[in-house]
Image (cartoon, rainbow, N blue to C red):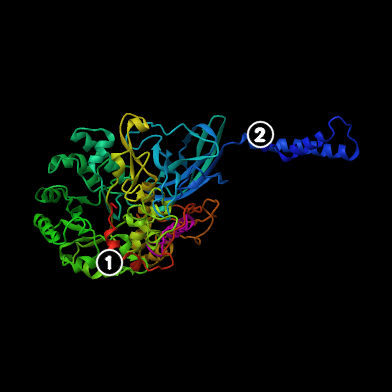
Amino acid sequence: MPASTYPPALEEFGRLALRSPNATLEGEHRSDLVKSLLAVLAAIAAFQPMAASAVDVWVTHSTEKIKASATARTTAAAKISAARNEFEAFQVVVTGSASNVSATVSDLTGPGKITGVRLYREALMNVTTPSGLDGTTGQIPDGLVPDVDEIFGEHRNAFPFTVPAGESRAVWVEVLVPPDATPGDYSGTVNVTWDGGSKAVPVTLTVWPFTLPSTASLKTAFGFTWGALNVADGVSSSDDVAALRAIYDRFALDHRLTLSHIDDGAGDDMTHFASYYGPSIDGTAATRLPGAKMTAVEAMGNLGTWSPFFAQKGWSDRLFQYTCDEPPLTCAWSDIPTRAATARAASPAVRTLVTTTIAEAQSQGVLSSIDILVPVINYLDDKAGSEFTGEQRGNYDAWLAGSSKREVWTYQSCMSHGCGGSVNFGNPSASDYYYTGWPSYAIDASAIRNRAMEWLSFRYRVSGELYYETVEAYRADPWSNQWGFGGNGDGTLFYPGTTARIGGSHDVPVASIRLKMLREGMEDYEYLKLLSDLGDEADARAIAAKLFPQAYQTEQSADDLFAARAQLASLIVQRTGGAVPPVGTPGGGTGPGGTTGGGTTGGGTTGGTTDGGVTGGGAGLQQAGASGCGSAGGFGIAAALGLTGALRLRRRRRG
C-alpha cells in the first residue's frame, strides 16, 4: 500500500526499529517497541475492515439530487409515507469503487401486499455552465433509465453499472400505492449487489387512510412538439408518430400531467385523433393511475371541425384555443379579439387562452376576449421594485366572477433562472440576482425548486399550469446536453428511450428526475386541495405559505417540505375521523439534516370507509445543494432593469 495509507502505529514501529536495527533492545527501548508492535497489530485489525469496505450503500429521500461527487452517509434504511393511489420514491446510493452493481426489490408486505415496486438507474448530465446564480455544475443526475419499463414491461439496461472510486451513483426506487391498499405499515427490502459484496436495505412504507384522485385536480397544458419526437426516434410514418405520441400521453398522465399540444400531422382527421388520443381524454387508456384523464386539450386544427367533435364526445370542457403567446412578442394585441371571435363562433364552450397579466390585457382593451389568463409566476408575486410586487392574485377576482368559463393559470419561464444565459458569476448585477429563488425545471436547480411550482399554484389560487415544451432538446442529444434559452433542461422533461440507448425492442419515454419532482408537486397539491375541500382551507393555505413565503423563496429545506406534508396528512386524517398525535412524532427517516415526521394513528378515508390504525409519518432529510438568493435584500429591480421595458421583453418562455 502507499506509504501515505499506513496506519500511524505502523510508521512509529518502523521508526523505532530503524533506530537500532542491529542492537539488542533493552529497557525503555524494548518497552517502546513492544508497545508499538501491539499498536501495530491493533491498527492492522482496525485497518483491514476499512480497506475491505470500499463500497458504501446508503439511503436518502426523493427530493435531493445525488451528484457524482456526493460522499457516503450513514442512513441505512428507507422510511416513506404516502396516500393511496400515490407514488412515493426514495434513493439508494452506492459510493464506490464498485463494479457490476445491480439492484432488486421485494414486494412490500404489511396489512396487505404492494407489488410492482420499480427501480431506475439515475443517468448523469455533465453540467458545465450553471443556469443562474443559484444553479450548479458537475455530474448531476436527471434521466431515469428503467430496470423494467412501465409501458411494455421490457427489461432495459439500467443494470449493471460501475461506480468509480470516490464517486457515487444512485438508484431511484418508486412505489405506487394501490387505490384499495389497506392503510398501515408495510416493509420490504432493496438488495444491492456488486462484485465482491452485497447490501440489504430495509424499507418501511406507511400508507395513509385517504386516497388521491387519478385525474389531476390542477389542470396542466404542457407542450409536446411531434417533430422533435420524430427526429429523436427515427419514426417516419404519421401512424408511427401517433402511436409513440399516444404512449407519451399515457406516460404523462401517470405523472399527473397533460400533454395538451396534440399534433402528429393528422390535422383535422378526427377519426385518427380519437383512435390514438381519445382513450387518454376519456380515461380509458392503459394508465397505472386507473381512469386518469387529460385535463386540457389545445385545438390544433379548424375549430369548426374540432369543436363539434369534442361536443359530441363530451370533451368540450377541456378544449381551448391558444389565442396568443406573450403579446406583443408573438402576435399584435389587436389580433386577439379576431382570433377569440373565431373560437367563440365555432362553439361558446371553447376557452381562449393568452399568456399575459390582467393589467396588460385591460390596458390593451382585450380582457373581454380572454377566458384563461396566464401570467408568469413572477408577476403573481414579484420582488421589490416591480409593478407586480406583492401578491397580485386578488386583482383577478372581480374578472373571474364575471363568467364560469374564466380561469387564472400560471407558468414559469426563463425568468426563473435568467433569459439568455448571460449571468456574470464573478460580479453579479442586480438583474442576475433577480433571477434567483424562483421555481425552476432546470437540471441544476435543486429538487425542491423543481417541486415547488404546484405549491405556489395552490398558494396563489390558480386553476392550471402551462409549460411551453417537454422535448425541446430532442433535436440534438438530450442525454449529453440540454443547454438552451439560458438554462439546462429548459423545455425538456423527457428523454428519448430509444432501443439503441436503453435496450429492449420498443422505444419509450424516459422520465427525468425533474418530471418526478413535478409529479410530487402535483401530489402535494392534492393534499392541499383535499384538506381545503374538507373545510380547512385556512390551515392548508397557512401551511403552503409557511413553506414558500413568496414565489421567489422556493429554496427551502426538504425537511420542512416533508414536515408540511406530514402535517397536511395528519389534518386530513383528523377531518376524516382519525385520531392523530401531534405532528412531529418520530416516524421519518434520519440523515445529515435531521429528522422530520408525523406519525399518525387512526382510521377513516375520503371514500367514507373506516380502516384500521395507521402508524408512521413523513420522512425528510436535509436537502443538499445551492442556496437561493431570495430577493437580494430588496434591491430596486425596476431601476436596474427598467421593468416596464427590458424585463417584460425578457420574460419569454423560450429565452
Q: Relative to 32, does residue 621 appear above or below in the rendering?
A: below
Q: Position of residue 651 (x, y in %)?
A: 29, 58
Magenta run includes residue 555: yes
Residue 642 visible somewhere in the drawing? yes
| Left or right of residue 22: residue 196 | left
Three-letter amino acid code at the position of disc 1? Thr
Q: Nearer the viewer, residue 176 or 194?
A: 194
Assess disc 1: are there few (<14), some (14-19) or many (≥20) residues with their C-alpha within 10 Å of its C-alpha: few
Residue 179 visible somewhere in the drawing? no
Q: Position of residue 135 (x, y in %)?
A: 42, 52
Q: Position of residue 404 (x, y in %)?
A: 20, 63
Placement of the N terminus among the 4 image quadrants: top right
Real-space CA distance between mark 1 and mark 2, rounded to the nearest whole angstrom = 64 Å
| Left or right of residue 33: residue 262 | left
Magenta run includes residue 475: no
Question: Label 2 belongs to which residue?
Answer: 2
What residue range appears in magenta?
Answer: 548-571
Question: Label 1 belongs to which residue?
Answer: 644
| Left or right of residue 125: residue 315 | left
Q: Nearer the viewer, residue 460 or 214?
A: 460
